[in-house]
Amino acid sequence: MTRSKSVWRKILDEKLGAIEQSTTMQTKDAGDRLDALANRIDAGLAQGHQKLHDSLAKHAIDVVRAFSDGGKQTTAALDAKLKELDETIIARSGTLAQTLSERAREINDTLGDRADEIAGTLDTRIGAFRNQCRSSAQSCFNRNRRARKARCRNDQRARAEINETLAAARRNSTPPCTHALAILGRR
């Protein structure tokens, strides 16, 4: 049996080797086919990308041309309108300047006559206002001077009464504060 086990082992090893070799070849063939398929997919995607890129570039150029042509047309139309506007403004500005000049002369004549009257009236009223202000200022000054003199006299009287009260308190031996407060309370 030992021989038969070794035979069987040998046969099994041969069969396993054949299977392994067959599997390796099939795996290699499948890998080669997958690589070929991946290469074809890459080539197809690259070609599609290039077509898309070329198409977008062409359309971008068309868009730029359209904008350029539109810009030129817009600029030409604006230039024509600006020239027309300039001509209109120049024509109207001459007429307007002449009308304004005539109106200014009329206003100047009218205001010139009234300006002399107004200046005379203002001078008279300003003089009266100055006199009134001087009179009011003098009156205020006199009132303030009289009020200061009256306060000064009242302060002198109060000091005299306080001194008199203090002297009387010294003579009578009464506390001076009590007597002074009594006099001040009378006021």
Image (spheres, helix red, strand yellow):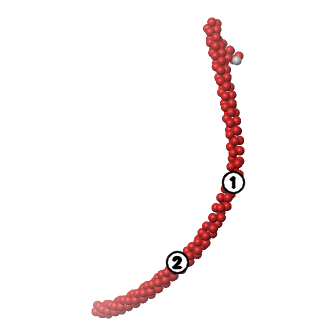
Q: Earlier in the sequence, mark 1 or mark 2?
A: 2
- Residue to which mark 2 is pinned: 68
Secondary structure under tag 2 reads helix
Q: Position of residue 182 (x, y in %)?
A: 68, 15
Residue 120 circle label: none
Marks 1 and 2: which is nearer the front?
1
Lateral position of residue 59 relative to residue 2, left or right: right
Judge whether residue 180 can be spotted in this image: no
Residue reaching furthest top?
A: 171
Q: Position of residue 38 (x, y in %)?
A: 42, 86
Residue 105 placement: quadrant: bottom right
Q: Residue at x 71, y 16 (%)?
A: 186
Amino acid type of the residue that numbered disc 1 sits on in the rendered structure: Ile
Foreground of the two, 8 or 2: 8
Amino acid type of the residue that numbered disc 2 sits on in the rendered structure: Ser
Label 1 – label 2 distance at C-alpha: 55 Å
Q: Position of residue 88 (x, y in %)?
A: 63, 69
Lateral position of residue 21 relative to residue 162, left or right: left
Position of residue 2 relative to residue 186, above or below, is: below
Q: Position of residue 32 (x, y in %)?
A: 38, 89
How many labels were placed on the picture?
2
Foreground of the two, 41 or 74: 74
Lateral position of residue 74 relative to residue 179, left or right: left
Foreground of the two, 113 or 67: 113
Residue 87 placement: quadrant: bottom right
Residue reaching furthest left?
A: 3
Q: Residue at x 60, y 69 (%)?
A: 86
- Residue to which mark 1 is pinned: 107
Secondary structure under tag 1 reads helix
